Amino acid sequence: MSLPSEYQRRITLKDLAKPVRWLVQHRSKSGRWVYVLCALALALLALIAIGEAGIGACVPEVIVLAVCVVQFVRPTILGWFVLIALFCFYTIEVATQWSWRPRFETLFFLALGGAPALALLISWPRSIRKM
């Protein structure tokens, strides 16, 4: 038993490339100030990690910082999504483990993750054609 002929369609490699192309297509640079904010938050987190656990502890922050630099130079939806997911996950992680930290420290780290996440939400990368 197969589908009727009007529902049968071959999926080609060109069809699969369309969503990927949309994810990595160059976007408008009008809202790229947000990546500077993200980079500042990550630099501060990296300095804190170095101070508490040594130079090896800042590797994750440096990798995400590299994504911020790439996004600043060539904004894409994929990079924006990666950054917003990471900052949101970080903020949720800090919020769920508030009980064993001092209140100021919790609020400080919530702001370090929440402010860039909120700024990223506001600055959705727009298509160049729509500008």
Image: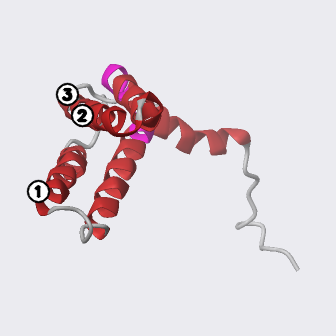
Q: Quadrant of the C terminus?
A: top left
Q: Earlier in the sequence, mark 1 or mark 2?
A: 2
Identify the mark at residue 30; answer none if there is no mark.
3
* Residue 124 rendering spot, x and y as whole percentages: 26, 43
Q: Residue at x 20, y 55 (%)?
A: 110
The image's mark for residue 44 is 2
Which residues make up the magenta segment? Answer: 71-79
Q: Is residue 76 magenta?
A: yes
N-terminal-most mark, 2 or 3:
3
| Distance in Å between CA atoms under marks 1 and 3 | 34 Å
Instruction: Give the quadrant of the N terminus.
Output: bottom right
Element carrying mark 1: helix
What residue do we see at 24% from left, 34% from top? 44
Query: Residue beneath label 1, please?
Result: 104
Residue 81 on image: x %, y %: 39, 46
Residue depicted at 65% across the width and 45% down the height: 16
Q: Amino acid at mark 1?
A: Phe
Q: CA distance from mark 2 to mark 3?
A: 25 Å
Residue 42 vs residue 103, the one in the foreground:
103
Q: Position of residue 45 (x, y in %)?
A: 29, 38
75 magenta-colored: yes
| Residue 8 against residue 81 in the figure, above or below | below
